[in-house]
């Protein structure tokens, strides 16, 4: 793990992005200069002192020059429902935590389900900078929940492959059919087979795509976003069952080889 920093970060902006979805931009020069694709920050909101546990969030994007990072978050419970009201506050963040996505590949397929599109965006930027061809499959319940779609489109220079449960954008139904299709046809740029699949989203989606990757004999990594307490490897609240025994999602992950995970 890279050296952890505890940084007080001012909220620069905090805007709605879709149904129960928001993007928070934070001034966090130390963590922004170090964070790598797949890593996360553990955040404490001083205005909510009664919620003593920090909350983990992947970093969606960062601007090392400006010293800012972005969190794309979904309102699901106590703290995330209070977060949209925050403007200009200072939050306490520990980071960067965890390991990183692999980048030693020649053709990659990135699969993001719902808010799981966020932790893959820095990986997409890294692959683009290294001139490694990659495609992106996004799935969400409805068009307005395909949160990072336009940003991925800007990076790719074309639309990502999208599926929505209600058919309001892209393929109607689950995005797994798009993954199946891409694996069969190969990379959109040159029809070469993929040698890397990176998946983030609900566990059932990751399990299905992990099976597809195994059948296609493509290295597959998943981001296991377990509930976390300490975030630094001490409390064992975030364990993942693997073929190598119990592993801590916070410090041994959050990225795991899919073939290692006991689903
Ligand atoms: C490594 C990591 C990266 C994450 N990145 C993001 C991100 O980029 N954007 C984002 O919106 N969320 C992300 N999460 C999930 C986020 O941490 C939780 O949604 C948040 O902690 C919930 O806090 P809360 O107080 O609102 O919910 P609580 O009131 O604590 O719980 C409300 C509901 O949310 C569920 N829940 C809580 N934590 C998790 C979790 N980790 N995974 C699944 N369900 C959970 C609970 O089971 C409960 O049903 C990430 C989690 C991890 C571990
Ligand atoms: S959250 Fe405490 S060990 Fe992972």
Image (tube, grey):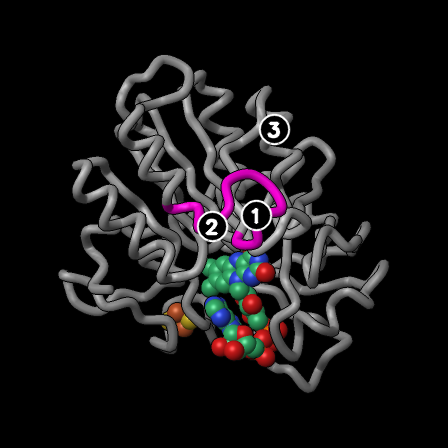
Query: Which residue: 77% across, 55% down?
Result: 16
Q: Residue 166 appears in which quarter of the rendering?
A: bottom right
Looking at the rendered structure, the secondary structure element under dot 2 is loop
Q: Quadrant of the C terminus?
A: bottom left
Looking at the rendered structure, the secondary structure element under dot 3 is helix
Q: Earlier in the sequence, mark 1 or mark 2?
A: 1
Q: Earlier in the sequence, mark 3 or mark 1?
A: 3
Looking at the picture, does residue 148 appear above or below residue 130? below
Q: Which residue is mark 1?
A: 167
Residue 7 location in percent, x, y?
65, 57
> Label 3 crowding class (10 Å Cα cut-off): few <14, some 14-19, many 20+?
some
Q: Which residue is mark 2?
A: 173
- Ligand 2 shows up in the quarter that is bottom left
- Give the camera-side residue of 57 and 161: 161
Magenta region, main secondary structure: loop
Does the Cβ of the disc 3 residue fall within 8 Å of ligand 1? no
Q: Earlier in the sequence, mark 3 or mark 2?
A: 3
Which region is colored magenta? 165-176
As measured in the structure, the alpha-carbon distance from the residue carrying label 1 to the one carrying label 2 is 7 Å
Q: Which residue is mark 3?
A: 153
Query: Which residue: 53% across, 29% down?
Result: 125
Residue 179 location in percent, x, y?
36, 39
As measured in the structure, the alpha-carbon distance from the residue carrying label 3 to the one carrying label 1 is 19 Å
Instruction: Between label 3 and label 1, give the one nearer the viewer.
Output: 1
- Give the camera-side residue of 124 and 40: 124
Q: How many marks?
A: 3
As measured in the structure, the alpha-carbon distance from the residue carrying label 3 to the one carrying label 2 is 21 Å
Q: Are marks 1 and 2 in contact (CB under 8 Å)?
A: yes
Residue 248 visible in the current orientation: yes
Furthest-top residue in this view: 190
């Amino acid at each position: 793990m890279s050296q952890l920093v505890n940084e007080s970060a001012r909220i620069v902006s905090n805007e709605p992005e879709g149904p129960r979805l928001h993007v928070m931009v934070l001034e966090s020069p130390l963590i922004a200069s170090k964070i790598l694709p797949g890593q996360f920050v553990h955040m404490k909101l001083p205005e909510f002192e009664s919620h003593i546990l920090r909350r983990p969030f992947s970093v969606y994007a960062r601007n090392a020059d400006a010293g800012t990072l972005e969190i794309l978050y979904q309102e699901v419970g106590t703290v995330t429902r209070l977060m949209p009201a925050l403007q200009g506050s200072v939050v306490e963040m520990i980071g960067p935590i965890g390991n990183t996505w692999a980048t030693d590949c020649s053709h990659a397929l990135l699969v993001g389900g719902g808010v799981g599109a966020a932790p893959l965006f820095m990986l997409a930027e890294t692959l683009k900078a290294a001139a490694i061809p990659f495609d992106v499959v996004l799935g969400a319940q409805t068009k307005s929940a395909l949160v990072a779609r336009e940003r991925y489109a800007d990076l790719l220079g074309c639309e990502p492959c999208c599926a929505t449960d209600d058919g309001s954008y892209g393929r109607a139904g689950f995005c797994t059919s798009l993954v199946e299709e891409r694996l069969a046809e190969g990379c959109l740029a040159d029809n070469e087979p993929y040698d890397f699949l990176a998946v983030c989203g609900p566990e059932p989606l990751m399990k299905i795509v992990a099976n597809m990757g195994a059948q296609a004999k493509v290295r597959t990594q998943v981001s296991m976003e377990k509930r976390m307490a300490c975030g630094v490897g001490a409390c064992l609240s975030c364990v993942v069952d693997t073929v190598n025994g119990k592993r801590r999602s916070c410090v041994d992950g959050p990225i795991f080889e899919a073939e290692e995970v006991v689903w």
